[in-house]
Amino acid sequence: MTAQPNTKLIGQAVSRVDGRLKVTGQADYAADYHFPGMAWAFAIKSTIGKGQLSGIDTSAAEKSSGVIKIYTAQNRPKMYPPKKEQSGGVIVSEQLAPLAGNEIHYYGQDVAYVIAKTYEQARQAASLVKVSYTPGKPIMTKEETKLKAPPEVNGLDPHLEKKASGVASVDSAWTSSPVKVDATYQTPFVHHHPMEPHAVVAKWDDDRLTFYTPTQWMVGSRNFLAKSLGISDDHVRVVSHFLGGGFGCKGSSWMYMLMIAAAARDLKQPVKFVMERENMFTSVGYRPFTTQHLLIGAQTDGKLTALRHLSETSASDVGHFVEGTGHASSYVLYDCPNIELDHQVYDLSLGAPTFMRAPGESPGIYALEAAMDEMAVALKMDPVEFRLKNMTQEHPFTKLPFSSRNLEECYRVAGESFGWSARKAEPGSTTDGDWLVGWGMATASYPAHRSPAKARVRILADGTAEVLSATQDLGTGTYTIIAQEAADELGLPIEKVKVKIGDSSFPEAPVSGGSQSAGSVLPAVRGAARTALAQLSQLAIDDEHSALKGLKPEDIVVGNGSLQAKSDPGRVETFAAILARSGHGAIEGNDSVDPAAEKKQAKSESTAEKVFSPSTTAYQSFGAFFVEVRVHKLTCEVRVSRVVTAMDIGQPLNLKTARSQVIGGAVFGIGAALTEHSILDAEQGRWLTHDLGTYHVPVHADVPEIDVHFVGPPDYKFNPMGARGVGEIGNTGLAAAIGSAVFHATGVRVRELPITPDKILTGMLAQAKSQAV
Amino acid sequence: MTPKPTPPTLDRRSFLKGLGTSAVAVATVQVGAMADELNKASALPTPQGPAAVPVSLTINGEKKDFQLEPRVTLLDALRNFSTLTGTKEVCDRGTCGACSVLLDGKLTYACMKLAIEVQGHDIRTIEGIAQNGQLTPVQQAFVECDALMCGFCTPGFVMAATSLLESNPKPTEDEVRRACSGNLCRCGTYPNIIKAVMKASGAPLPETNEVIRYGSLA
């Protein structure tokens, strides 16, 4: 049985199927749920950066109106927080159990929770709780602590190197290189700040928990809650039909979730908790501070001879996440005979860091690409020409061939669209009134991942269909691409396919991290749709009264909600009619796709080429950013005036949503380059940026038109859709391109993000001074 | 809810004054407004609260009666004391615009208003924009231009865009930017929001730039 040609929705610019709900305020997010008798929780946070809790006086708060209970370390509800951060389908970034004891590890650590009848009453009572401390000295800088090698970086050894034969060390190869760059880059702490705050509504019905929370992994959050509440995982249902963004901070299960679930069990009433924006700085992760030392050597013709990427990144003694910078950039981008990666971490008195959109790649590619631009300048080569000298069709370390790599085409398409060939090499060569105009470019890249996923497709009595999977839509467009895929397979108009996701009771799907959801879940949707159709087809074949009676399955095609004979379009049966005559209310097809098993299942040499095989193939997306900035010659304010990008992500599943993902990633890149910076008070150990007024995410005025191109063929070696995922690659490369453009405009090289006017001004003053001498 | 004794450290008057200042102090430029607010609070003949009091609001043309403590914001009244959860809470500090509503037709942050002070005013929320299930041109254009991703800032942007087009039906792109300058989007939909508002205003849109060129190397 085959779908009719020329009806494919996959790949087209289909409007979001959930768009209507979102523009009318009808989309139901976790914190929109209310239940009779529901209480509110309010968290009380430590106000010291390190030390001991010496006392909590709740007497005044207990008497405050509406208070139901105040939880402290003394009366913590029953729970079993996991000891291990990552085991059995659970991801936990911060190991510190809620209200675990008197030791304070960081500013903003939970010390008590007030439960009251209303939000206002809980907040009021929280203000009456008196907490006393014996403060210690928080460790806030690298200099106060020790560097150490983490157990692993992105699953690899923290120190990796490859050398050409006869080369003593990568360092010696660098030292003897004719042209050298030696530069150190810093990227600051940054925070995710999805618009939707973390939130929980926990509701128990006897010993069963329904838990509304925005999570990037329904199944992982369910597993975490079941384990740490000591109940069966089929007694926990995690629901979040919509997420108001995630960007990584909703990828882990956080202990506040456990706290609220345990409190609701203890109090025998539903409890709601919505995290204060201020606590989104302290309590749900951030991107670590990175310092990256890049040493690049090249021949005078631009061929790379040595690349050393030495990283030091902040960590926390209550977490384990490592921002794998060099291992996510210099590891994979360019051909170079001698490469050394080294990674060390240092623990600060902060809550745990966690994955943030393109973890590792974002700061790692920033530093590598900034250094590559410095090398192009040192070589007096065009930055694109220099990169083109160092292309590779195989992974530089593993030597595995890339499944599909079209970076040269990305440079060409984006460069032509941008008009790069008109670039004057000399910095400061273009002005527009008081504005210095600069152009820069950089490479973008992100690996492609797949994980096991399941889906169920049901064809219903009225001839419509529904698709169920415990995956989630963070705003990426998961609802829409699933509807497109199912509609294509079932030959139904998209309006007749209802997608049900965001519920852990549906067939299991992986965490929406690593840009893997589309590539993992859609093959299962396709398989489930085909299974359902095969059953429906069999019903029609076996049915005495069917126009399709006695046909072979391969002689039947599907379209317009009907099955018909391939050879005779007059022999047709609607889904509804087949079901009605069969007496079945619905037909159900399930599929479970384990990418690791695909190679074993491949039947022939020709199909073996088209199966996922990470042991023999490298899967990596590449792209290019070209950008124009304007720097005011007096105020040093930077405006991004043009962005052009070309991305090779295989097949874009939906041109609208894929384009939006790239735009969104680019806007993250503009923020990283120019505005975003979480600032610490090194004495107190607290975040000075504590709201969206002090932490500057890009706003309308910061974002120009962003011109997005997709290049390269579908990558059928990766999955049957040929799609490698697009959520994160947009947040790689642009920050470096902006830094290079600022250099091109001003001649000032800022190596510490964000590139704020003070840093440019300092460089311009130094420049003026040296010219005056 | 039974009235509770006045909190020990506050008399009713200073409690009300506190309400006025905390609600306004965060709105940075409104020094004059703060003084007005204090005067207004002092001049009230009957102090209200701190226990819940009857509050009557006109929301989307419909009168709704609440029992609210005077400290409940308009945002929390909508979200927590009625079923109008389309208005979103993001910052609760007047910095993001996600809770935007129209108050007597004027774009207003609902987190910056107490419910009790908007009695007698006409409140329009995102739920009151589409009429009889028909999306407005703004809503339709947001969907078609993909001017939303996660959707959490979207109600606020739809309100801001609606407010703009009601007062300025043919805005320029810069006017759209300015009108939406009080709204944050973390997914980065800004370029598509401009397209959507321009489209809703009837302006001709240039072709989108997305280009598929696969096959050129295969």
Image (cartoon, rainbow, N blue to C red):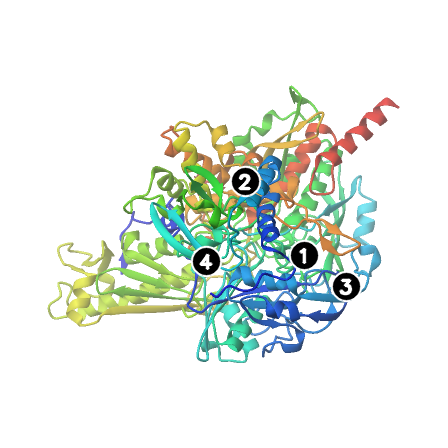
- Same chain, labels 1 and 2: yes
Q: Distance between the residues labelled 4 and 1?
A: 42 Å
Q: Which one is in front in this view, the residue at disc 1 or the one at disc 2?
A: 1
The chain ID associated with circle 1 is A
The residue shown at (17%, 71%) is A582
> Which of label 2 and label 3 is nearer to you?
3
- Looking at this view, name the residue that lies furthest to the right: A773
Could you say which is closer to the camera, residue A576 or residue A3?
A576
Residues packed near mark 2 inside 10 Å, few (<14), some (14 to 19) or many (20 plus)? many
Q: Does mark 1 fall on the same chain as mark 3?
A: yes
Report the residue marked by disc 3. Answer: A50
Q: Which chain carries label 4?
A: B
Q: How far apart are marks 1 and 2 (CA)?
A: 25 Å
Instruction: Examine the rendering and report whether any part of residue A218 can be seen.
Output: yes
Q: Mark 1 points at which residue?
A: A324
The residue to which callout 2 is attached is: A410
